[in-house]
Image (tube, grey):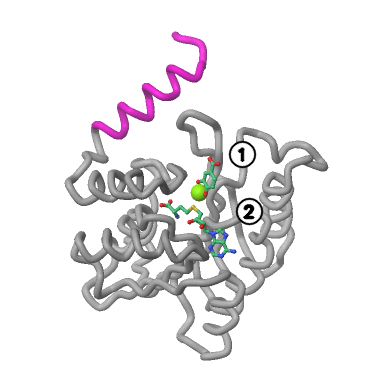
Amino acid sequence: MEPLNEELVEQIDRYIEDLFTPTDASLAENLKDANAARLPAINVSPNQGKFLYLLVKIAGAKRILEIGTLGGYSTTWLARALPPDGVLITLELEAKHAQVARRNLDRAGLGSKVEIHVGPATDSLRSLIRLEVQPFDCIFIDADKVGYVEYLDLSLQLSRRGTMILADNVIRHGLVLAENPTDSADRGARAYNDAIAHDPRLESLILPIVRRRVDGLAISIVR
Ligand code: SAH
Ligand code: DHB
Ligand code: MG
């Protein structure tokens, strides 16, 4: 057997992708446009997108909240898993990212299901709480890592028993293993992991996600 190395891990990810996550025109155009608009290429991987899609379907989610839209790549996967009457609200700081995402989602035929709220996520979350919107069935946290713990706290106020709360990039190539990571994003991710591990309102686990680097997706369910 081959020893575990980065190349083998990437080959395995590709093998799974070829089997279960064939690229389609919408997703390919999404990434092409995001790249042309010079958005950073920090979207979830195709396999992770497919995983998010499956989780939404397994949960039977009808209302999804996403924090961190970028060009709408993960948004596309999540929204595709919604039933016809499903809705997704996605929060994005950068107007330019939101603009690229809006065009991508419209072109993918998902425009009518997705609302993009532009501004700092904390502000958008607080207005949703103030408006007393219906609780979300699934919340995907994927914006600035420094804000993760606050996003969790606000997300819990938009949840019900059984809401699934997901968070991307919580392992960061193992940099979260340090007790006091020097980088603020690593510190934010580690603080998030500690928060979900100890919050009595949640049952949680982190699933390692391996592509070019080892990262992780946190999965929590509200008791
Ligand atoms: N979920 C996307 C990737 C999101 S990248 C995907 O997988 O396709 C993180 C996004 O969060 C970026 O677009 C960034 O502009 C946004 N962001 C950063 N800080 C934010 C904040 N304070 N409020 C809302 N969005 C923020
Ligand atoms: C990075 C990756 C992400 O998925 C993200 O949300 C933010 C940053 C990165 O690789 O730097
Ligand atoms: Mg991410």
For image coordinates 74% across by 59% down, the residue present is: 198
For image coordinates 31% across by 58% down, the residue present is: 76
Q: Is residue 106 left or right of residue 158?
A: left
Q: CA distance from mark 1 to mark 2?
A: 10 Å
Q: Quadrant of residue 83?
A: bottom left
Q: Alpha-carbon neighbours of circle 1 within 10 Å: few (<14), some, or many (≥20)?
A: some
Q: Is residue 17 left or right of residue 42?
A: left
For image coordinates 36% across by 64% down, the residue present is: 99
Q: Circles 1 and 2: CB distance less than 8 Å?
A: yes
Specify the amino acid type for callout 2. Answer: Lys
Q: State whether residue 193 is above or below residue 101.
A: above
- Residue 15 falls inside the magenta stretch: yes
Q: Which residues make up the magenta segment?
A: 1-18
Which one is nearer the viewer's eye here, 99 or 73?
Answer: 99
Secondary structure under badge 1? helix
Question: In the rendering, at what x and y percent does residue 192 appear?
Answer: 68, 55
Q: Which residue is disc 1 drawn over?
A: 172
The main secondary structure of the magenta stretch is: helix
Q: State whether residue 172 is above or below residue 55.
A: above
Total number of numbered discs in the rendering: 2
Q: State whether residue 125 is above or below residue 43.
A: below
Task: Tell which circle, 1 or 2, labels the residue nearer the N-terminal end.
Answer: 2
Q: State whether residue 36 is above or below residue 63.
A: above
Quadrant that contains the C terminus = bottom right
Q: Which residue is disc 2 drawn over?
A: 145
